[in-house]
Image: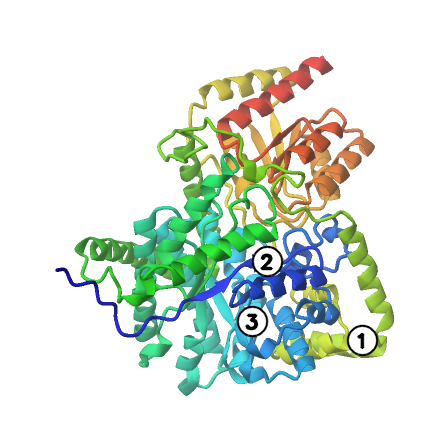
Amino acid sequence: MTTPDKPKAERDRPWIFRTYAGHSTASESNRLYRTNLAKGQTGLSVAFDLPTQTGYDPDDLLARGEVGKVGVPVAHLGDMRALFHEIPLERMNTSMTINATAPWLLALYAAAADEQGADRKLLSGTTQNDIIKEYLSRGTYVFPPAPSLKLTTDVIAWTYSNMPKWNPMNVCSYHLQEAGATPVQELSYALATAIAILDSLKASGAIPEADFPVAVGRISFFVNAGMRFITEMCKMRAFTELWDEICRERYGVEDEKYRRFRYGVQVNSLGLTEPQPENNVYRILIEMLAVVLSKNARARAVQLPAWNEALGLPRPFDQQWSLRMQQIVAYETDLLDYADIFDGSSEITRKVEELKIEAREELARIDAMGGAVAAVESSYMKRKLVESNSARLAAIEAGEQIVVGVNKWTESEPSPLAGGEDGGILTVSEHVEGEAVEKVKAWREARDQAAVDAALADLRQAASEGRNIMEPSIAAAKAGVTTGEWGRTLREVFGEYRAPTGVGQSVRDDAGDLSSVREAVEAVSGTLGRRLKFLVGKPGLDGHSNGAEQIAVRARDCGMEVVYEGIRLTPAQIVNAALEEDVHVIGLSILSGSHLALVRDVMDRLRASGLTDVPVVVGGIIPDEDAASLKAIGVAAVYTPKDFQLTDIMADVVRIVAAGAEKAA
């Protein structure tokens, strides 16, 4: 007779279950939050729209087409109040993915909590507040690095005294992996960021020396987990050991609880596929296992993307499906009954040590440059990410890295999941933006303008004098100041910043067979009388620049002259660049769902400028019906994530230019 396995006496508590959510309006998002909480979600993870993330109101010119698309618009205290209606903040754990405007959104949150009568010392949650990775990947930075670091440390210092249960910073390596980071780059760049922040905090003297270990203990991390299951799990064990080492040796933290690597995770969205999207369910589960199986490196909070996020915004059912995945693993399996099942494995130990050695070497290189900020300003880290992403895409194109349903086993039955009238995704109605514009105007008209002016004057003075920005921001929130007014006031003091693009000279010569495309470029250039010139533009506030960067790099590899000025350009700026640079073709990259409004604006401006002979191609997460609409207004070609062969796209672009040149001749 065999003896059944004996689980340990006390079962571990599960991690916090989250879904990353927010769209259209604060009231609609609140309804979604309360529904998800009723389904067993145990924490909130707020997705803000791009105007909110970059400090603009819904009626700002730069906000056009972006309001409510990738998250919820929060323009003032009234929106924050509506967002958390009937949700007791004192008992909720709230994560807010916000960076450049983190002090402002935390100020609004604190003001809303005050209205509820909540004790600030009981508020728990996280502001991401990691501006360094925004310069490298996601692009929602606003101010230059130095004042941005000051704002980050302001939040850390203020929460230490006023909201001690709050995680004031979430060092975020998630978006680094989305931008192509290898496991070693994700480890080293994230840890270098944490070091830069803690060094800055320590130098500021904002926290007494004796209390510094407690502040270190409030720093958390937000990571990514991809499909290389064993490597990703070993990466997490390496993270925990390296962080313990840094806290102990660099900062002298003796108490083990303040050296713990506390992290939340959203598993990889980069690897989710538009073809055969149902396969993404398996990918998400496998990726989640990498961050929950190893007890010594288990995530404190998990949020999972939905199977259809490569198609568009997930619906409530899709989010429920991802939530149920977490609940089944936590409650139906025996995962939480046992100690770490990987302890003692020589293979796991070998891989962890290998990652740690390489990460230490990269950290030393960054340190020799002057740290993470210097490595951003020199474009070192950005350039390395662009190179890594180029290598990843080239491997997929060559079939060396298999992606099921994309470059192998592509024959497929139609997916019933993606059918139906809604196309399997949630669509934000066009009227949402207009209503948001009217609401923010009404908010401004109803407030006490004298109180607003006084609050903004104090905010400006605090920023100019180097005082902590949090209390003036909370006072501004309560006076009725808007997100755009807060952002504009600090822009006037700190200025704005454009980060290096990382797109230098040609990165690869072996990205597929480029010879035929290069020959075609040479032939068309001969017909044109000069080098074929390609403008790659990022209109609107979408800072996800990976696709645009890779298109720019591959176009240059193919012999084209490339104009790429980075993110956050207005349609007017793009058309002006087309005029000044005298380009032959324009490529627009938009992943925020604002493609219809922004592309229509660009096309109208091109016609008004007499550039009707310059073809426009568009790339992004674009449903079929929207692609048809874009072509109806004159767009020459539309590319979506299923079009992964970049060299084929280049050949297509050359054919489009050649056809136009022949027609003109």
Give the quarter of the image for residue 621. Answer: top right
The residue labelled by disc 2 is 21
N-terminal of the two: label 3 or label 1?
Answer: 3
Q: Position of residue 15 (x, y in %)?
A: 42, 66
Q: Is residue 370 visible?
A: no
- Residue 278 in the figure: left or right of residue 494: left
The residue labelled by disc 1 is 453
N-terminal of the two: label 2 or label 1?
Answer: 2
Asked if the residue under mark 3 is in contact with the one under mark 2, i.e. CB atoms within 8 Å, the reply is: no
Separation of marks 2 and 3 at Cα, in angstroms: 29 Å
Q: Position of residue 289 (x, y in %)?
A: 36, 54
N-terminal of the two: label 2 or label 3?
Answer: 2
Q: Label 2 amino acid?
A: Ala
Residue at the extreme front? 1
On screen, residue 208 above or below 521 = below
Q: Nearer the viewer, mark 2 or mark 3?
A: 2
On screen, residue 94 above or below 640 = below
Q: Position of residue 174 (x, y in %)?
A: 46, 55
